[in-house]
Structures are given as structure tokens and as C-alpha cells.
């Protein structure tokens, strides 16, 4: 039996695709292995969002070819494969096959072709109409948490982003399929599902089938209510697109305890000038309106975001707007990125005119501002009780277990492995900038 080692770069969507690639390969008599040394076939499921990730791919292929005298088959999957297609073989002639984002279900066919002697196998075609989204128990990234894709691709074309080119246009999965999938996971004992997609709240299935019995201002908020009705313990969803964020989503969260009280809403900048250049489709005033609704909702909803600093033409005044925005929104957590031009995007034509030094300074200043806000927010959890899904043994020595709250905060605490996969009440006794610490009070599910 041939052994396959699969390495994944990038977002949840890639992790989710890799889980299914491994499921298909296992069902077709390949053995998945975490050990690249013993593998006959090495697969890279790639990310193209940052050029760095693409360089990492070439470095890793170089390492594989240098380290092992035994010839291993090397296949490149995912976003870089989709974007580069045939040119990948020119960039690195030692690659045996290339499978685009929607062709990953045909990994075994690609491997078989190479084993039969065909070189440079390429498939960047569409997904099979009957593509099976389920994942074998053995290939899940967690026994308690599952990713459930609800929409693929993106139609937004933000000027800095490669995703619409690598993942194609938005395509929503039919609601009955999603609901069936969640029911199945619930029966299998999964506690938390993450509805995933580049923009989950742009969800627009071809028909309203499966959603007829659920209220909602948009198809997405109907879907949230339908998934909540499955009775699964927790539902999270990422990522939301600000322009499509209807406040009915907040109503749905307020009505359903199992819809988690966490929203990830990438703002990217506090300056309208920069938002326009990024072609984000929202103004900062529109964004603040949504934040006001989130902050005044019945349930306390935690809010996280992404921000890019140093986008072309970002002046000091624009940057100050981003600082003000961070203070206004009081994010529970924030991913800050320094802008770097990505070839193939419209913004690549813009002059990258914020110097490396300015980007560095702005990054430090924004990070510090967020750190102070975050410190205050995390401190407000002291002596409070939160419910935590126990996910894994902690990587830190003093605390045995680690999990996340419904509002997506990491909590560490002492406890036995018997608690893994359970939802427990934890009293918070200590807070740091990114982590809460506490002690177990009760176990629920
Ligand atoms: S919404 Fe914008 S940033 Fe997000 S995936 Fe689409 S194009 Fe990229």
C-alpha cells in the first residue's frame, strides 16, 4: 500500500479540503502518514494569499528532493496550483502533478496516472457535481470540532486579494446538504461546527429548499436558524463580509444559545480613502453601524477583525483613522498584517509607497494599541464563569487542558483527560493578553 504525506498551508478552507483529500485517498487504498520520510507520495495543499506562502512551497519541494534519495511523487494542490497551472512545471520541473482548488477530489486519479508513468499530470477543472463533503473519523483535525463549508469562492475582488482568482466565483452549497451534514456530525458526537467560506454571510443558494421553515432577513440568517435547530451544541461561522452583514445575524445569535457569541468581521482599515482603494464595498460609517448593533446586542458578542497597515497611499492621517477605529470597536482580537503587493492582484499596479520602516512603526503602534484594549477586555473576564469546549491537552506545562469559549477565547486549566470533548464551566482566575486561565466548576455535555 502506497503511503501519502499531506502538508497543508493557509486557511480553514484548505484544512477542510485536506481532510477530504485524505478521506478519499484512504478509501482508495492509500495509507495516510504523518511521516514524510516513509511516504511514497508527498502532497502540498497550498495557499496563495501571500507571496511568502508560495515561496515556502518551492523551499519545501527543494528540501524533499534534496533529503530523500528515494524518488517520491510530489503533487501540488490548492490555490497555487489553480493560479499557476501548467507554469508550475516550468517553475519546478520536479513536480509530478498539479491539482487546482476544485480538482482536489481527484487526487487518487492524479497519483495513479503518475504511477502508471504519465508525467506532469494537470487538472484545474471544476468540482464533481456529486462531490462528497464528508470526512472520515480518522482524518478529522479534531474529534470534537468540524469544519462545514457552506460557500466557496469570492465575488468581491478587493484590490489586494488573490482569492477570487484562485478560488473562483461564489458558489453556495444547497441548504439540505449542509443541514444533513450537521445532523450527521451531531450523531457522531461532534460538539462544535464551524460554517466556513470566504464570505459566509454572502450565502445565496440557488433555491430556498431546506430553509422554508425558518425565518430570516437573508438566506444566511435562515441557514443559521436551520443549523441551530439541529441541536448541535455549538455553531461558529467565519468569515463575514461587512457589507453583507445583516443585523438579523445578531437576532439569530440572541435567539439561539448554540449559535456562538463570536463574530469575525474584517475591517482592513479605518480610513474611507483606503477602504475605497481596497475596493472593500463598505465605509467606516457603515462598519461602525454594524459594530454598534453587535455591541448593544442582548448577548455579549465578541468581535475580532483583520487590519492591513501600509496599503499604498496610506498617509499618517489614514493610519490615525485606523487607530481611532480600533479604539472605537474594542476588538477582542485583531490580526494585523503589513501590506505586501501580491502579483496578479489589481493593487499590484499601485505604487507600494509606504516605506518598510513606516510599515514597521505603524504595525508596532497599532499592535500596542490593540494589546492595551485587549488586555482590558480579557481582564473583564476575571472571576466570571465561562463555558469551554475542552479541545486538547495544553502545550504549556502548568496547565493540563485547553479549550475555547463560545466567544472563541482560549482558556487553559487543570483537569483530567476524561474532560476532553466535554463542555465545562470554568471560573476565570487569571488573564493574559491572548489567553484566560481558570478552574473547572461543572461538566455539562
Ligand atoms: S472579500 Fe475581499 S479579501 Fe475576502 S476573499 Fe474576497 S476578495 Fe479576498
Image (cartoon, grey):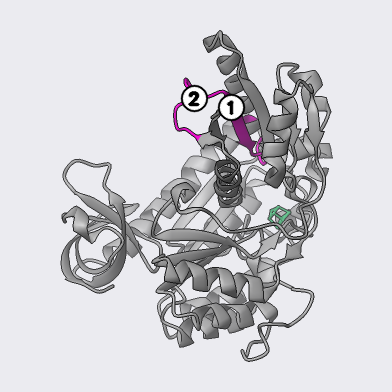
Task: Name the residue rendered at 73%, 48% in the picture.
Answer: 163
In this picture, which residue range is highlighted in magenta?
Answer: 32-52
Residue 34 vs residue 3, the one in the foreground: 3
For disc 2, the neighbor class at 10 Å (few under 14, some 14 to 19, many from 20) is some
Q: Where's residue 405, x and y in %?
A: 35, 65
Q: Mark 2 points at which residue?
A: 36
Total number of numbered discs in the rendering: 2
- Which of 338 and 108 lies nearest the eye of the viewer? 108
Relative to 284, residue 313 above or below: above
Q: In which quarter of the image is the C terminus?
A: bottom left
For image coordinates 67% across by 29% down, the residue present is: 75
What is the quadrant of residue 351 in the picture?
A: top right
314 shown above or below 378: above
Can you give x and y, in whole percent of width and height, for residue 332 in the image? 42, 62
Q: Image point 71% across, 16% down: which residue?
A: 94
Q: Which residue is identified by label 1?
A: 42
SS of the residue at dot 1? Answer: strand
Amino acid at each position: 500500500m502506497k503511503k501519502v504525506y499531506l502538508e497543508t498551508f493557509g486557511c480553514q478552507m484548505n484544512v477542510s479540503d485536506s481532510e477530504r483529500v485524505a478521506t478519499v485517498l484512504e478509501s482508495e487504498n492509500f495509507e495516510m502518514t504523518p511521516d514524510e520520510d516513509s511516504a511514497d507520495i508527498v502532497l502540498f495543499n497550498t495557499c496563495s494569499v501571500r507571496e511568502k506562502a508560495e515561496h515556502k512551497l518551492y523551499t519545501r519541494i527543494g528540501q524533499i528532493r534534496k533529503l530523500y534519495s528515494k524518488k517520491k511523487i510530489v503533487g501540488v494542490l490548492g490555490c497555487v496550483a489553480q493560479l499557476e497551472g501548467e507554469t508550475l512545471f516550468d517553475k519546478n520541473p520536479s513536480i509530478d502533478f498539479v491539482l487546482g482548488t476544485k480538482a482536489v477530489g481527484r487526487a487518487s486519479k492524479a497519483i495513479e496516472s503518475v504511477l502508471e508513468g504519465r508525467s506532469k499530470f494537470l487538472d484545474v477543472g471544476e468540482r464533481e457535481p456529486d462531490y462528497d463533503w464528508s470526512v472520515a473519523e480518522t482524518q478529522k483535525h479534531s474529534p470534537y470540532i468540524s469544519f462545514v463549508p457552506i460557500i466557496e469562492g469570492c465575488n468581491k475582488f478587493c484590490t489586494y486579494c488573490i482569492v477570487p482568482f484562485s478560488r473562483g466565483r461564489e458558489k453556495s452549497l444547497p441548504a439540505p446538504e449542509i443541514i444533513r451534514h450537521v445532523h450527521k456530525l451531531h450523531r457522531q458526537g461532534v460538539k462544535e461546527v464551524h460554517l466556513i467560506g470566504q464570505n459566509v454571510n454572502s450565502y445565496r443558494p440557488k433555491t430556498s429548499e431546506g430553509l422554508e421553515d425558518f425565518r430570516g432577513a437573508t438566506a444566511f440568517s435562515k441557514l443559521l436558524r436551520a443549523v441551530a435547530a439541529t441541536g448541535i451544541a455549538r455553531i461558529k461561522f467565519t468569515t463575514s463580509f461587512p457589507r453583507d452583514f445583516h443585523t438579523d445575524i445578531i437576532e439569530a445569535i440572541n435567539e439561539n444559545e448554540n449559535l456562538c457569541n463570536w463574530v469575525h468581521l474584517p475591517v482592513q482599515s479605518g480610513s474611507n480613502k483606503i477602504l475605497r482603494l481596497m475596493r472593500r464595498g463598505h465605509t467606516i460609517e457603515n462598519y461602525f453601524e454594524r459594530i454598534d448593533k453587535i455591541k448593544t446586542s442582548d448577548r455579549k458578542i465578541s468581535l475580532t477583525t483583520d487590519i492591513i497597515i501600509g496599503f499604498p497611499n496610506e498617509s499618517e492621517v489614514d493610519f490615525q483613522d485606523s487607530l481611532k477605529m480600533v479604539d472605537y470597536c474594542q476588538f477582542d482580537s485583531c490580526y494585523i498584517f503589513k501590506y505586501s503587493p501580491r502579483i496578479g492582484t489589481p493593487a499590484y499596479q499601485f505604487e507600494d509607497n509606504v516605506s518598510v520602516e513606516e510599515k514597521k512603526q505603524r504595525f508596532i503602534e497599532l499592535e500596542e494599541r490593540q494589546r492595551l484594549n485587549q488586555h482590558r477586555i480579557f481582564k473583564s473576564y476575571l472571576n466570571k464563569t465561562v463555558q469551554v469546549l475542552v479541545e486538547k491537552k495544553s502545550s504549556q506545562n502548568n496547565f493540563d487542558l485547553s479549550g475555547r469559549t463560545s466567544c472563541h477565547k482560549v482558556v487553559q486549566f487543570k483537569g483530567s483527560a476524561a474532560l476532553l470533548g466535554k463542555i465545562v464551566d470554568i471560573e476565570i482566575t487569571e488573564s493574559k493578553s491572548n489567553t484566560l486561565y481558570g478552574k473547572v466548576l461543572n461538566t455539562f455535555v
